[in-house]
Amino acid sequence: MKTIYIACITGLILFYCTSCSKKADNFAEVDRSPVIFPDYSDILIPPNIAPLNFLINEPGVCFETRIRQDKEREIVIRSKNPAVEINIKKWRQLLQESKGKKLTFEILVQTESGVWQKFKPIVNEISDEAIDNHLAYRLINTGYVLWNSLGIYQRNLENFNEKPILENKSVDYGCLNCHSFCQNNPDKMMMHVRAIHGGTFLNREGKLSKVNTKTGYTLSAGAYPCWHPDGKHIAYSVNNINQFFCSGPIRIEVADEFSDLIVYDTEKNIITTTNEVSTPNRENLPVWSPDGKYLYFISAPPATDFHERVFDKYSLLRIGFDVNTNTWGRADTVLSGAKLGKSISFPKVSPNGKFLMFCTSDHGYFTIHHPMADLNLMNLQTGEIHPMEINSPQTDSYHSFSSKGHWFVFSSKRLDGLFSRPFFSYLDENGKASKPFVLPQKNPRFYHTFLKNYNIPELITGEVSVSPVEIRDIVLRDAVPVRLDAGVDTSYMKNHLAAKKN
Amino acid sequence: MKPKLFNLANLYLILIISGAWGITAIKTEPFLHYDFQQMGFITSFSFFRDFLTYPGGISDYAAEFISQFFRFNALGSLLIVLVASLQGFLAIDLISRLIAKKQHNFPVFSLILLAGVIVLSDYRYPYYATLRLLLAFIFTWLFYFLHKKFPATSAYLWFLMAILLFYVASGPALFVFTVSSVAILIHLEKRRRWMIIAPLLMIFAGILPLAAYRFIFPVSLHSLYDIAVGKPPEFLAYATFYQLYVYYSLLPLLLLISLIFRNKEKVSPIPVVKKGTKISPVPFFRKNSFVITVQFAVLLLLGYFLYSRSHDNFNKKLLYIEYYAENGKWDELLNAAENIDRYDFRINFQINRAYAHLGQLPERLFSYPQLLGVNGLFYDNSNMNGSFTMSNSDLYFDLGFMSESLHWAFEAQTLLPNSPRILKRLVMINLINRNYNMAGKFLNVLDQNMLCHDWVRNYRRYLSDTTLAASDKVIAEKRRFSPGQNYVCIDPLNDLKFLYDFNPKNRFAYDYLIAHTILSSNFTDFMNYIPYYETFGIKTLPRSWAEVLSVNIVKNKTIPGFVSAETISKDCMEQFNRFNAILKQYNYNVEAAKSRLEQEFEKSYWYYILYFDPKVTKVLNNKIQIR
């Protein structure tokens, strides 16, 4: 017994002596910043974000990280492991006390020869403005046609908790997609269920329902959605879409053969459309202006052959719509794709109505598979357009503003060229975006092994309070069919559909 | 007195365990389960965490862990037999404690072992069902002891055990536990007491999954009540349910049956032997050794009967074909296919690949009846259920078309996210495409599979030293053949033309291209591409090409410029003349000439276009029939 005790104590002493317990006092300065993953350098940090855990990609046997605003407010992490996992309580406190100030990350690495190296500090800034505290997204594998387990999840951005909003294992493995929230409100949401138990699930502040938005006069059930700011109407595209597999940098093309727009009144259970947005052209991806008076959308000419279908460019249009009277205005071109020399997709207006952020690619609208896809910003007051400074050589696509309009999230494949990850950036009053950073994870190696895509990241102001069990029970019910607005010219829609089918 | 360890009963027990092991290893061959189901156990916490989110998840996790060792046939068989034996031992321990008789031990044990082995004769069998049942056995066994020790409070403890068992092993295991517990209570309790408790336990067990579904777990209701949960992918959906129901009902049933023997034992009077009377010898048929021997023989026969009824030999052969194809054992594949006398489109597909790999496709294209035409070369994916995703990826990998191979590998990975085979394919394609970062990511995931460390170690070197990738024979060849330019895949024929046009040295693509034109009777493309045969050093055309060319020459009454005296063999021309002569003999009545032509020309293009071509047979009009 005595021998065991002695062995244990010796072991502990040895462990203490060989572990990274001593502070690095003597070091050699290295005239460059350390390589860390994910890249959390020169960024603006929301004051309520979860710890930005990272991996020090420098060779060494011992690692010391000092995160400080000033000498009094400092977090020191010392470890043999290059993975830096920051204590969440200390991090929160540090961030709250450092709003609007610089935050320095000092990294020291002990080499195998025992010499400590101190790298140039990484300097970040803490924003005064908090980001919406939850992010909703779909997690999906990289299969293009088939699916298995998938779900729509919500992640608390202030910590690392991720909860399912709904997983498809509870609804017989149907496909879930196109989750959408009304002005970042977690209590006003919708999502589609396809293939099995098909329909559109709606949560209007606790009023749960499931509807079938397909009518005999429209191309399909509602697809790409956008809530009207009044929280009662949702604009949808109705599409006939296919995908094509390719060789070369673009592995897959998704193209619509036909597309129109509809608006769904959630209270009256009525859909409406007009011949201005149900034309032979391909109207797609509707989005409301923050005042709710205009519906922005993209449009491409009718596709007469396969080449046009895939390689046409989309323009940005808008049309007036009065939700009180269900009356439409005339469609106007806001930005011509042909003139821009790019195809426009995923327009989103900032909540203050000042900017319109959109995606561009060489052709088509489904940019997530296009490595050349970039984000652009249009100043709606001046009409000025510029490609955003946050773009990367890889796909930068689907984006969503926070409720206050400065923080935004977008999908990017910049980490590896294949998997889409949510990145955050801050858009200032002049339309300048801060350097983006990826969604922080507890394990900094998370993205090294995670093989699912973050699909349609949407910032929301809190947790979706309806439980997955409640949503499941609604989804398993039969969908209530919607009615067509009596004001819609049905003979026009009939002819329009017949023409498209021919 | 200590019981003898090496008595006849134990000998038979050892024999039956060894026999079960042997049969599982030789006949069932669990490595085929591994190969078919693509078991991929990952050691990461996030993998484990997913199993905590639903009832039964923990036993599923344990099953995933155990079943990965099915890859090693002997070890996998041993594990299967050991788990089933453990169930058997628990059952005999329980029953012998309840009825204080050991005569029934052997049949009880054997029946459970037999059922535990037979369920695996279906290669889609989800092994978690066995693990869940094992937990039900263990909980029942524990309940017996708890009840013995705390008879007053055991009923309360039962409820706790039921909740725990439901969480770790789901509803059906709970039902087994419940009925078995009731049987134990009937054994041990007074009628008045068990009559009150038993219905309570039954009602609780029936309601618990429903309550969990309604209020706690966002899962489907049938997943809590079904023994084998129907979940994607569709092709792995288990369907042989009667065996599973028998397996699950054995313990409760045996415990209930044991009640009969308990009562019998109570009524049988103890014989009184008077002093001086001679004890008559026990007749041989009442001797323990005889009874056990008879039991052994009967169970052996029953086992043979049930196993032979359950074992799907054709399916096993099919899996062997797939296994050989995956591992590039083309000669073995062709040998195995020769022993299958039934047409199957999957065999057709793999045989074509085998011929192409061995360089025999042009010569032996019609050695196997090409009943589906070009759909024997490329699967018809219009009605996808995921069965062919990896086979498609394999074929495009063979052809050197990396983007399509990747596309199908991703579809496969969506269905089976941690399959080592699929992850290895993703690593290889990314190495070929020089996406070292991505290859590294898939290697990271594969490295979490404890059976793949060596493979990962080997290929991880390629990331840091890219010259290793360049000098790898497979990678170098695929790099040469894989086109990098923009192209939208429309159909297999255009894909093949694209591949061949990109690199005319791609013999595999060329053979498939010509085979495609032949099987679709696409003479225009055949005549466009066949003149390039000389680039592969061919002087005389292989059989199927020559047969098509001969038809073309006769049809057009002209000899194309590329045809020399040695392009078509004399033998081929003679055969063609003979074929035509026979037809003429029957006044060109195709139906009448069929049996005659079949004898000599069944394996020729000429016979194909008259009798096998899907345009003639219209077989593709009913795709369900093909499947």
Image: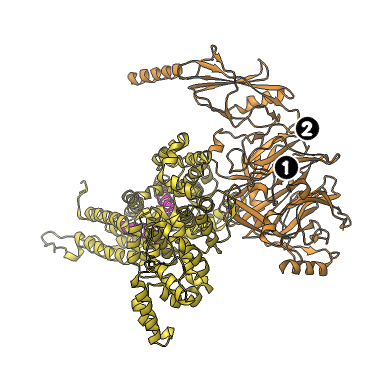
Query: In this view of the protein, can residue A458 be seen by the observer?
Result: no
Disc 1 crowd, CA 10 A, few/some/many (<14, 14-19, 20+): many
Magenta residues span: B109-138
Q: Position of residue B187 (x, y in %)?
A: 39, 56
- Residue under the image location 80 percent in, 32 percent down: A430
Q: Chain of mark 1?
A: A
Q: Secondary structure at mark 2?
A: loop
Residue that mark 1 sits on: A400
Chain in yellow?
Answer: B
Q: Position of residue B456 (x, y in %)?
A: 43, 40
In terms of image quadrants, where is residue B295? bottom left
The answer to which of A313 and B167 lies nearer the viewer is A313
B463 over B614 or under it: above or below: above
Labels 1 and 2 positioned on one and the same chain: yes
Rendered image coloring scheme: by chain
Amino acid at the residue labelled 2: Asp
Magenta residue check for B128: yes
Side (left or right) of B54 relative to A52: left
Magenta residue check for A18: no
Give chain A's shade: orange
Side (left or right) of B277 relative to B456: left
Disc number placed over residue A428 in the picture, else none? 2
- Residue under the image location 52 percent in, 26 percent down: A82
- Residue under the image location 26 percent in, 58 percent down: B103
Of mark 1 and mark 2, the one earlier in the sequence is: 1
- Estimate the spatial distance between the alpha carbons at disc 1 and disc 2, rounded to whole Å: 15 Å
Q: Secondary structure at mark 1?
A: strand
- Residue under the image location 41 percent in, 18 percent down: A14
